[in-house]
Amino acid sequence: MRKLLLTVFATLFAMGSALAQPEAGSTPRPAQSFNPTKVMKMAELPKVVAAQRHVLAAAADDIITEQPAGKLYGGLIASYGAFTHNWIYGTMDASTDAGIGKIVEGDDGFVYIYNLPTTFNSESWVKAERLEGDTILLRRQHIDQRSGYDGTVYDYYLTRLVWEWTNKETGEGRFLEAQGDQDIKLLYRDGVLKSIEENEDPYVDGHYAIGVVYTTDEKVFKWEGYANWNLQMEPMTYEKVVLPEGAELKSITVSYDPENPKAEQIPCAFVGNDVYLTVVQEGTYIKGTIEGDKLVFKSGQFVGEYMNTYYLFFSGERMKKIVDEESGQEYEAADLLDELVFDYNAEDRSFKTTDALAINAGRKTARLNMVTLREPYFYFFEEVPAVPADPTITQYNATIDQWGYNALQFTVYATDKDGNFMVPEKVTWRAWIDDEPFIFTTDDYETLSEDMEEIPYGWYDSGYNIYTSFYTIFFEPAKNVGLQTIYRGGGEERHSNVVLYDLATAQILSVPEEEITGIGSTVKSDAKVTGVAYYDAAGRQVSASAKGFVVKTVTYSDGTRESFKMVKR
């Protein structure tokens, strides 16, 4: 069974923590100004601007990458206010109450905390001295080092930051490295960590945060866009839902997001009046209970971890649109529900709701959603003939002069035109160029073992010229480029419209296939192919390897024929 919504994870963490820090071999960038209303569910924040200050380099300890010897408190659950940063969206709010933390009480008498600040993901340990009572002290220290493409070495330091408004009228502010005292004091005992200085509103002049600055010369230090405040860690007490022994898992289909219909199949089990669903990682479940004609899932169920950074919890959410008063821009937010209630049909065991099912990196707030299924409808799928949804074209790149090829970017869906699930293994797509089906040949696409007219859903070639979301061409089309989806389900073959990008107008058109070719597409039954023949423009039969304009005629065992006009290059 397919895992659900891996692309959602990838998309979210391209925005957030997974890509928040530059990888080795990349060049870090300071925080950029941003408008938080552009990012779904991000809190109302001031615009954050890059900070820079000339200071003397502090003596840096070695970076601690190995877990120190001592007593480990692993799998702590952390709450904190936070900034994270990436190259696309700049600096963003990443506050949560479901972070993952680790602490070691060292045999050497020090306390070691893993991965501070929590959103930077240095994969190193910071060292804290014990003071009187439960107080510990973090000094400014070296936590990471990375190299840029040009060989420049970037050194990162954990330090104390303070907030400064640069222009309250325009809502611009920044964190600066504290001058003078750069130490950070925390409270710690037996796996429980807590900030001493709590800032309900961090955006007050002088309020502090735990953050990162970087340097290339040990003279100029810049804030990198990462910060924590109101930090707290404590032992994790939540337990995952356990599937009862002997429960039978079956695939159930979920259709969701009416504005952009999608469908998936996920594992499901009915055990008495209880229903178990796997929405993310295999072997993890959320549990609902049938109550008459309702199916109720309680929010707050623990479902797993993500990248050793966040704990994941199930939440029911009510989505709403909010309009920013200043910009007039509309964005989406969510209210967290105590429970998600579905209308339940006992006859076919289907269930649906107008609210949203979410997997959230938060216990009590709808802030960092890993998965959001808007208006989900769960049902047991029966394969039937279906007309596939039209693919969508996202971009055409005319780069043949620069790179030697042009490329069309697109999305193909494994759903029908009404948003219902289709068997992915029975979905293919084919390219169209200049009003003709296009064949990918071994002459032009050298990694192919044979010419390909149709591409299976989710397939790509090893040369990455034909991919799940784009294809390249090595000539200049005259009129248009596009594609269509084909589905062979329920014993029949049915086609979507042909979606074309018009080169002259840059418009995207959705056109029935018959209007382009003048040759109708026949809906077939279970008939087998008995013969394939190719003809040139004069009607003479030619070989399958013939180039140029050809008509491909397919004959079936029931006596029907289907013809396609194409250009073979």
Image (cartoon, grey):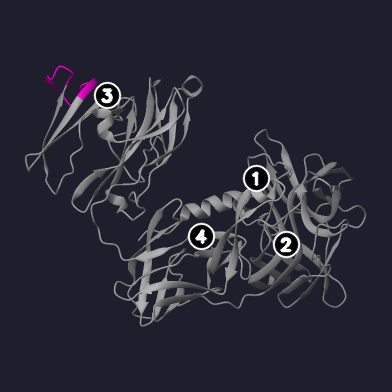
Say which label, 2 or 1, has the lower sequence index.
2
Question: How far is the residue under mark 4 from the one under mark 3?
Answer: 43 Å
Depth-wise, is mark 4 or mark 2 nearer the camera? 4
Query: From the viewer's perspective, is residue 302 above or below residue 540?
Result: below
Question: How far is the residue under mark 2 from the one under mark 1?
Answer: 18 Å
Residue 545 visible to the viewer: no
The disc at residue 567 is 3
Front-most of residues 364 and 55: 364
Disc 4 marks a residue whose amino acid type is Thr
SS state under label 1: loop
SS state under label 4: strand
Residue 486 visible to the viewer: yes
Q: In the image, what residue occupies the spot 89% across and 45% down?
A: 55
Instruction: Indicate left or right for 409 with 120 as reference.
Output: left
Question: How far is the residue under mark 1 from the one under mark 3?
Answer: 43 Å
Front-most of residues 33 and 111: 33
Q: Which residue is under mark 2?
A: 81
SS state under label 2: strand
Q: Main secondary structure of the magenta part?
A: loop
Q: Which residue is under mark 4?
A: 372
Disc 1 marks a residue whose amino acid type is Tyr
Say which label, 4 or 1, has the lower sequence index.
1
Residue 540 occupies which quadrant of the picture? Answer: top left
Front-most of residues 493 and 103: 493
Label 2: few (<14), some or many (≥20) within 10 Å? Answer: many
